[in-house]
Amino acid sequence: MTALTLVGSPGLTWRCLEGQTGFEGNGNCAPGRVAFTGSGLTNSVRVTVTRSSSGEVIDDYNYDSTGGGIQFVETLVPGDTYSVEVRGTNGLGVTRTITTGGGD
């Protein structure tokens, strides 16, 4: 029997810097700054942030992620749902959906 191990599986977590909104536990951030931490990435990644209601791209840039990790802050205003994609040069990546404001 052979064990399968995923090496370098990308991960992306976030935390609300302006607090949360809505009912307790809904996971919505207040509109404002949101801090992201990525891991398991290549040494260079492309970060793309898109506002869902309008399709507006508010960030689309290559970032240094030497050592496989990255930390960055996005200002997600106005309140909306945003798609945050981090993709490495090897094509592997991760996408998260963040909602700011509302939810109650």
Image (spheres, rainbow, N blue to C red):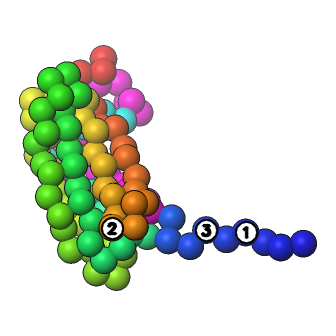
Q: Identity of the amino acid at label 2? A: Thr
- Nearer the N terminus, badge 2 or badge 1? 1
* Side (left or right) of 20 relative to 61: right
> Where does residue 40 sit, x and y in percent of width and height?
43, 70
Taking the spot 35% from the left edge, 24% from the top edge, the residue there is 23
> For residue 43: magenta?
no
Label disc, if present, on residue 6 of the rendered structure? 3
Q: Residue 99 appears in which quarter of the rendering? A: top left
> Where does residue 17 sit, x and y in percent of width and height?
19, 50
> For residue 16: magenta?
yes
| Residue at mark 3 to residue at mark 1: CA–CA distance | 7 Å
On screen, 73 above or below 23? below
Label disc, if present, on residue 4 of the rendered structure? 1
For the residues bearing labels 3 and 1, Cβ distance under 8 angstroms: yes
| Residue at mark 2 to residue at mark 1: CA–CA distance | 23 Å
Out of 21 and 1, give the one closest to the viewer: 1
